[in-house]
């Protein structure tokens, strides 16, 4: 029994050779049923590169999310970057940072977007 009462949870991990690894978790309890999936892409360009989806049956809510990062040396003039995107039926949110290198080293660009319907 958890802090929110009785629940049942199952997990299945999987791998798609050459593409990435992920997992799906299903939870049923006093708070309803949710299914949550995540996938981590194997890529030389993005680090991290992950996507996920959550569906809550009780509230009929669907949320998709992605996180993409770029390390030094992938794009000239960029030391690193990280962007997170979240999409629901009601909103789209983007937030992240780009850390510049070279002659602009130490400069940071904030990236953002938010739209609610």
Image: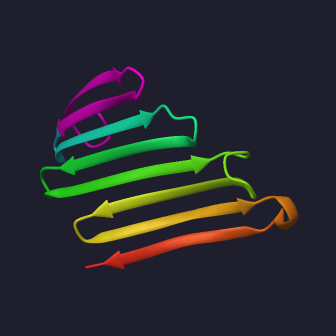
Q: Nearer the viewer, residue 30 or 111?
A: 111
**Of the pair 56 and 21, the residue shown nearer to us:** 21
In the image, farthest residue toward the front = 76
**Which residue is at a point 35% across and 69% down the rendered structure image?**
92
Task: Tell me if 102 is positioned left or right of 111 in this view.
Answer: right
Vertical relation: 55 (above or below) 104 = above
* Residue 16 located left or right of residue 113: left
Q: In this view of the protein, which residue sits in the foreground, 95 or 43?
A: 43
| Highlighted magenta segment, given as a residue range | 2-28
- Residue 93, how many percent across, how many down? 41, 68
Question: Residue 20's quadrant in the figure?
Answer: top left
> x, y (%) of residue 110?
62, 70
Which residue lies at the image location 17% right of the left edge and 39% below the top edge? 29
- Residue shown at the point (57%, 35%) measured from the top left: 44
Q: Position of residue 30 (x, y in %)?
A: 16, 44
Count of numbered circles in the view: 0
Indicate left or right for 99 with 103 as reference.
left
- Depth order, front residue of 58/1: 58
- Using the rendered view, name the quadrant where residue 46 is placed: top right
- Check the picture and name the quadrant holding the C terminus: bottom left
Q: Main secondary structure of the magenta part?
A: strand
**34 part of magenta stretch:** no
Seen from this angle, which residue lies furthest right? Answer: 103
Answer above or below: position of 86 versus 53. Answer: below
Judged left or right of residue 33, residue 2 is right
Question: Residue 7's quadrant in the figure?
Answer: top left
């Amino acid at each position: 029994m958890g802090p929110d009462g009785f629940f049942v949870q199952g997990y299945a991990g999987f791998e798609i050779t050459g593409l990435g690894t992920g997992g799906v978790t299903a939870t049923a309890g006093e708070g309803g049923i949710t299914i949550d999936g995540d996938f981590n892409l194997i890529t030389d360009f993005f680090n991290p590169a992950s996507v996920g989806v959550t569906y809550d049956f009780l509230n009929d809510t669907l949320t998709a999310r992605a996180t993409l990062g770029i390390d030094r040396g992938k794009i000239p003039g960029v030391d690193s970057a990280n962007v997170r995107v979240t999409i629901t039926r009601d909103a789209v949110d983007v937030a992240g940072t780009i850390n510049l290198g070279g002659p602009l080293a130490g400069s940071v660009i904030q990236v953002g977007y938010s739209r609610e319907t």
